[in-house]
Image (tube, rainbow, N blue to C red):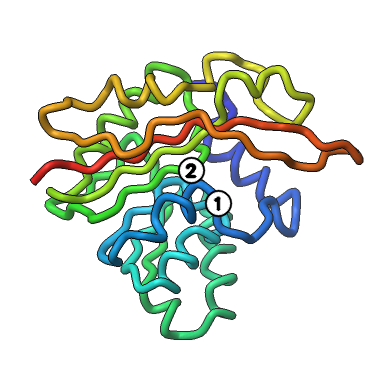
Amino acid sequence: MTVQFDEDFWNERYRSSHRVWSGNPNGGLVNEVSDLDPGTALDVGCGEGADAIWLAGRGWQVKALDLSIVAVERAAEHVASSGDDIAGRITWQQADLLEWDPGTDRYDLVTSQYVHLPSGPREALYDRLADFVAPGGTLLIVGHHPSDLDTHLQRPRHADLYFTPEDVVSRLDPKEWKIVTAAATSRTVEHDGHEVTIHDSVVRAQRLR
């Protein structure tokens, strides 16, 4: 695995800035999960905690994981300002996503937002995340679409780190999963005073009971 996914790299990335991300929940999560009844959630690659905090605020009991201990500690600091009710619904843990063992726990929602790995480890991660979903539960994976290589935003310059919705769906057995969303969505952001259209790969699937 390349240095970009080393724990030391991500710890330094978070130490380099007071806040790396916006502090807002990811739009793909909000769009796809708002209509779900709250239950247990696993937030994989939680970063500074915005998604986990949003989920907890909607009544979910959240397990939030990240490779970076700096990110996890910062997320725990951020949730403190949200009050004990929300903070009490989240458990934060530093963990290697390719090695973490949930034991017998399974989750009503497993969400992975913008966790970008090379194709081999990425497929292994998707298989693991699918295994963590409880019967009737939801798997949500969102990431940068390959077309984003053509933008001038701060994106990894390696094509192998990007994926299509089909790449995710191909890992899911149709006898075990109902595909709810499999789409390349677009949104407009401002960059250096210009509007740029970017694209996300969004897959939402429900494990059949």
Amino acid beneath label 2: Gln
Q: Earlier in the sequence, mark 1 or mark 2?
A: 1
- Evaluate whether residue 121 shows in this view: no
Q: Residue at x 67, y 43 (%)?
A: 13
Residue 31: where, in percent of width, then height? 47, 52
Mark 1, residues whose alpha carbon is within 10 Å: few (<14), some, or many (≥20)?
some
Q: Nearer the viewer, residue 12 or 138?
A: 138
Q: Are marks 1 and 2 in contact (CB under 8 Å)?
A: yes
Amino acid beneath label 1: Asn
Q: CA distance from mark 1 to mark 2?
A: 7 Å
Q: Which residue is mark 1?
A: 26
Mark 2 secondary-structure assignment: strand
Residue 162: where, in percent of width, then height? 53, 22
Q: Residue at x 54, y 79 (%)?
A: 82
Q: Quadrant of residue 10?
A: top right
Furthest toward the top, the residue is 159
In the rendered view, would you say 180 is above or below 26?
A: above
Residue 166: where, in percent of width, then height? 38, 20
Q: Quadrant of residue 38?
A: bottom left
Q: Which residue is mark 2?
A: 113
